[in-house]
Image: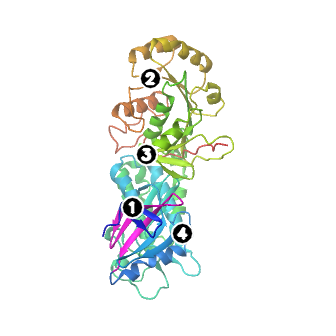
Amino acid sequence: MKIQGTILSGRYQILSEIGRGSGSIVYLARHQKLEEYRAVKCILKEPDSIWRIREADILNHLNHPRIPRIYDMEEDHEAFYLVEEYAEGESLEAKMLQSSFITLEFIVQIIKETAEVLHYLHHLKPNPMIYQDLKPEHIIVGTKGVKLIDFGIALYLDEAGNKFQNYGTPRFCAPEKLKEAKISIQTDIYSIGRLLEELIYTEGNDKSQCLMHVARKAVNADLSERYTSVEELLSDLTSHMQSSQYSIYQGHLLTKIVAAGSQPHIGTTHLSVSFTQYFNQHNTLAVYREKDTSNNMRTAIKNGRFAEDSGLYRRNGFFGMPDYGEGVRADVPERAIEISDYGTDLDGALSEEFDMLLLMIGSREWEMAYADLAFERLKGTKGLAIIANYGSSRQAKQYRKRYGQAVYCFPLDFNPFYMTKEKERFFEGLLEKEGKQSNKHWNCRIDPRRWSNALVCGVGKLCSKRTR
């Protein structure tokens, strides 16, 4: 059955298929009047379809920020259609398959946020619920953290019968579930233990191995040896990570980067967008903020393919905020690096508290006078990094002699949203040479399976100061 391109119930325009499950297809849809995205789960009418649509009733009784809301349920002669909140982001499965930069803190954050949902389900009143189908495919990682999707086989513990006893993915199923023994909240605890194991194996170095004892206890086949609650698991995890032995977990390397240029059209926006893209492709959440008056971000949003969520615009791995003006409050998500583009407003850039200030200057001879003026205004500023554009290493060397400090050469580039190997090497080198990445660590691009710096290869505790 194909419904892509159709209008469902006169309201939802079906845009594309975004997933498939056992007996169902999930589509991305747009509400035509509200201009908001929805996920539409199409369930074919079959003998057991009545059990499959029970997800609508379950979601209707749940209220948690990490669980998608259900808006509507429609049907025709062929299928039922569950209209749910669209969980923007990428599945944990995709991140684990495509990225070599799964880190210790990323693992801990995923486990904590997933456990938060399970804790909610396990303490529902009057009837606790178990999720039963925890696996990377059902965990969506977005700018606001984890969303747990697909409650098709979730079960109230006092529910009559055991329709879903043998459902689920075998490698994440607890032994008692496979043996058709009594299931409980410890069944979910086993699954989160398996998830933790998978993340540890994906990260693949000694740093994450420190969490293996937590995973082993969670997946113990002997129920008397397994964690009895999510709280117990989280307590063990937290106390371990807060120990002095792993104090690197507490580190803050970067929270805010500010960029400014020596003159108009010098490439400050291009640099800032590219840097944002670089961080996000390395699993370090970064958000571009437009702070100049050029409205480049607004123009890009108008002309490009961006998805909007609470004032934050996304395009593939890029996240950005246009300049909303003084009267509008817009917050950068927690744990994100904020990259503020001030255009030619040097004073505005200096008014910020920042960890790094990027000055973009021109590489043509007639642009040197503007570069000199900008350098005079900013010289001596802690965290200043000077960048010459157009890929002119010769001019960068001249500037280096002229200013008595390092001047980096940004490669010639045409698309700030695409990460080339040249830009990859540029940003990697910039962070290393500016002391934001320690030389004693291995290069994560060359040897991604080994531990590298918490900035470049890690999510890190990067909590931005929220913009007023």
Q: Amino acid at mark 1?
A: Pro
* Residue appearing at x 55%, y 16% in the figure: 370
> How far, Cα to Cα, is label 3 from label 2?
23 Å
| Callout 2 amino acid | Asn
Q: Secondary structure at mark 1?
A: helix
Image quadrant in which you'd find residue 254: top right
Residue situated furthest right in the rendering: 327
Residue bearing mark 2:
389
Alpha-carbon span between mark 3 and mark 4: 31 Å
| 315 lies above or below 66 | above
Q: Which residue is mark 1?
A: 136
Q: Nearer the viewer, mark 4 or mark 2?
A: 2
In the image, residue 444 sits, relative to residue 240, either above or below, namely above
Report, in whole angstroms, how far the alpha carbon at label 4 lies from the one at label 2.
51 Å
- Nearer the camera: disc 1 or disc 4: 1
**Element under disc 3:** loop
- State whether the magenta stretch is mostly helix, strand or loop: strand
User: For mark 3, what is the residue?
Assistant: 317
Q: Quadrant of residue 419?
A: top left
Q: Which residues are magenta?
A: 19-45
The residue mark sitting in front, 2 or 1, is: 2
| Residue pictured at 62% horizontal, 47% vertical | 330
User: For the point 61% across and 27% down, which residue is it?
Assistant: 345
Mark 4 residue type: His
Q: Amino acid at mark 3?
A: Gly
